[in-house]
Amino acid sequence: GHDLESCLEMSKSLGAIFKEDQIYRIDHYLGKEMVQSILLLRFGNAFLEPIWNRQFVKSVVISFKEDIGTMGRGGYFDSSGIIRDVMQNHLMQVLSILAMEPPVKASGKGYSKYIRDEKVKVLRCIKPWKMENTVLGQYVSNGIDPGYSDDPTVPKGSNCPTFACVLMEIDNPRWEGVPFVIKAGKALDNKKVEVRIQLKNPPGAHQIFDGAKVPLNEIVIRLQPKEAIYIKTNVKKPGLLTQMIQSELDLTYHSRYEAHHNPDAYTRLLLDVLRGKQATFVRDDELNEAWRIVTPLLNEIENTRKEPFLYKFGSRGPKQADELLERVGFVRNRDYSWPGAKM
């Protein structure tokens, strides 16, 4: 579909021919190794589930970054924009698995229904996205790489966003008051998709360490490339002085599981179709909820011809997006860089 109305119409047409358990709506992100790992990470580790809530989590950021532009596909992209292209579908799926309640089952007979039930429940707790909590951007030339409007397939004067950053909250007991941010963009400074779960300040740390700045812990799930899960932790810097530095507990898949074959997402999904497993496919009510959340914002962008902020090809995106993250309390530690990114 293109919006909630077209989605409902398409679902009605499909429902007239097929039963819901005969329909497999593919979102290839649900076949990715790291997306499938989130369930096991959350519910298979005694030390994580107790802190996976508003008592400990300060903010959650889901990021999608591409370091290329539309590359001659601007005509197609202009009809969808970055929100329809990756946020309404791929990143919304990641959000639902990340934030949902424990399912009755995550494997075994009938588990697909239980997982999809919980995904729908958490989506129903998200209010429609609003422009006031959104930053839109469109990339321009950096003097070497062409800007979006330089693509000959893009209509003249297009205000189609190639970048979006959206703030939302999940109104349920687990997540009330925790800011969730989804951001995605093209022509940025690097290529990656990741989740950052930033935890609150350790109680009393400011007093214990004589006013020293204590970096915030983060659980980072890197979906691609170089799949990894790492936890940013504070440790003593080696040497005579008691000085705090940030390091990591790191599980980088390509080095830890070097001998293991990691199948393509579509390979996994096609195998699940053959096996009749539907947990990794999108149910009709789940799809409807995703469109319910994003359609009002899409309509406002199109009806008001909202002008996006301009950002240079190869940059971090519009500075207003970083300002939005700072406004909700997300802290970027500029003194830390994950070593796995260089491997």
Image (cartoon, grey):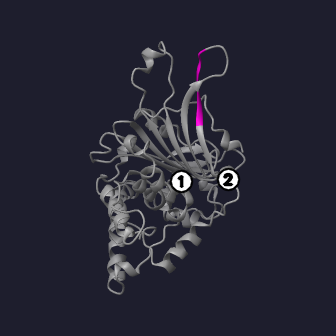
Q: Main secondary structure of the magenta part?
A: strand
Residue 140 in view of the camera: yes
Asked which quadrant contains residue 236, the reply is top right
Residue located at (48% from left, 71% from top):
26
Tell me where residue 32 appears, x and y as whole percent.
Answer: 55, 61
Q: Nearer the viewer, residue 27 or 138?
A: 27
Tell me where residue 183 appears, x and y as whole percent.
Answer: 48, 48
Q: Which mark is residue 254?
A: 2
Magenta region includes residue 137? no
**Neighbourhood count class around disc 2 (C-alpha, 10 Å): few under 14, some 14–19, many 20 upward:** some
For label 1, the SS is: loop
Gap in Å between the C-alphas at discs 2 and 1? Answer: 31 Å
Q: Nearer the viewer, residue 259 or 248?
A: 259
Tell me where residue 239 appears, x and y as whole percent.
Answer: 67, 18
**Is residue 325 placed above or below 171 in the rendered structure?**
above
**Is residue 33 placed above or below 145 in the rendered structure?**
below
User: Which residue type does callout 2 highlight?
Assistant: His
- How many badges with numbers are in the image? 2
Magenta region includes residue 247? yes
Asked which quadrant contains residue 25, the reply is bottom left
Q: Nearer the viewer, residue 301 or 155?
A: 301
Query: Which mark lies nearer to you, 2 or 1?
Result: 2
User: Which residue type does callout 1 highlight?
Assistant: Thr
Left or right: residue 184 compared with residue 168: right
Magenta-colored span: 242-248
Q: Which mark is residue 162?
A: 1
